[in-house]
Amino acid sequence: MDDLDRHLLLLLQKDGRRASADLAKEIGLSVSATNERVRKLIDSGAVAAIEAVLDPVKSGFGVTAFIFVDLDYSFDENEFVSSVASFDEVQEMHHVTGQHSYLLKVRTRTNDDLNHFIVKSLKTQPGVRATETQIALNTAKETRVLPL
């Protein structure tokens, strides 16, 4: 990956719908050369997906919570991971260091929906010993753009 690829990736992160002609002009290559670079970046896995990023609040998902999960490791951790990762409410799932096992980022429409998810979906998973939930009051910054 060279500097042109990194510049192209930065542009795509900011606007994945940007026209090929605009991308080409910005990085100083022909449209066909630019399209070939984009294809190679996608094929290599450097670009995992090109997707629409929705505003959660405007889309009706006004509750963002971060949930620490403590596991009893006598249960199969892989089963926990695959089961919890399949829940639509779970936006992110991280195996973390420290006193907790996992950190989940969860989005729901209401606090009642969050409570239902925690009680009926999360805490019923085999191996879940305890959870600790933090609700975000507002979000000052949220990005998926990597600083290339």
Image: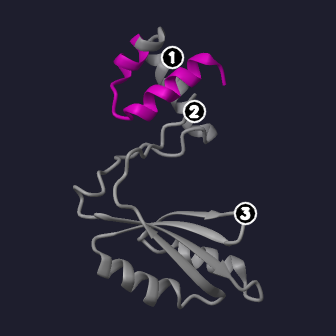
Task: Name the front one of labels 2 and 1.
Answer: 2
Please give the name of the residue rendered at 39% of the width and 62% of the height, measured from the top-left corner: 136
Give the x, y percent position of residue 21. 35, 17
Mark 1: which amino acid?
Answer: Ala
Task: Tell me whether the residue at label 3 lies in contact with that at label 1, contact meaning CB atoms closer than 8 angstroms.
Answer: no
Disc 2 is placed on an element classified as: helix
Mark 2 and mark 3: Cα distance apart in space: 32 Å
Q: Which residue, given by chain and number where applicable, does mark 1 sit on?
A: 33
Q: Quadrant of the C terminus?
A: top right
Q: Which residue, given by chain and number where applicable, does mark 3 sit on?
A: 97
Please give the name of the residue rendered at 60% of the width and 76% of the height, measured from the top-left corner: 69
Residue 40 lies in what quarter of the image? top right
Task: Name the front one of labels 3 and 1.
Answer: 3
User: Residue 41 shows which numbered tag?
Assistant: 2
- Nearer-the-camera pick, 120 or 35: 120
Instruction: Give the vertical position of 138 relative to 144 (above or below).
Output: below
Mark 3: which amino acid?
Answer: Thr
Q: Residues within 10 Å of mark 3 (few under 14, many from 20)?
A: few
Q: In this view, does 80 lie to the left or right of 138?
A: right
- Nearer-the-camera pick, 43 or 113: 113
Q: Residues within 10 Å of mark 1 (few under 14, many from 20)?
A: few
Disc 1 is placed on an element classified as: helix
Main secondary structure type of the part rendered in magenta: helix
Task: Tell me whether the residue at label 2 lies in contact with that at label 1, contact meaning CB atoms closer than 8 angstroms.
Answer: no
Give the x, y percent position of residue 65. 43, 67
First to last magenta residue range? 1-25
* Sequence-first disc among 2 and 1: 1
Residue 102 lies in what quarter of the image? bottom right
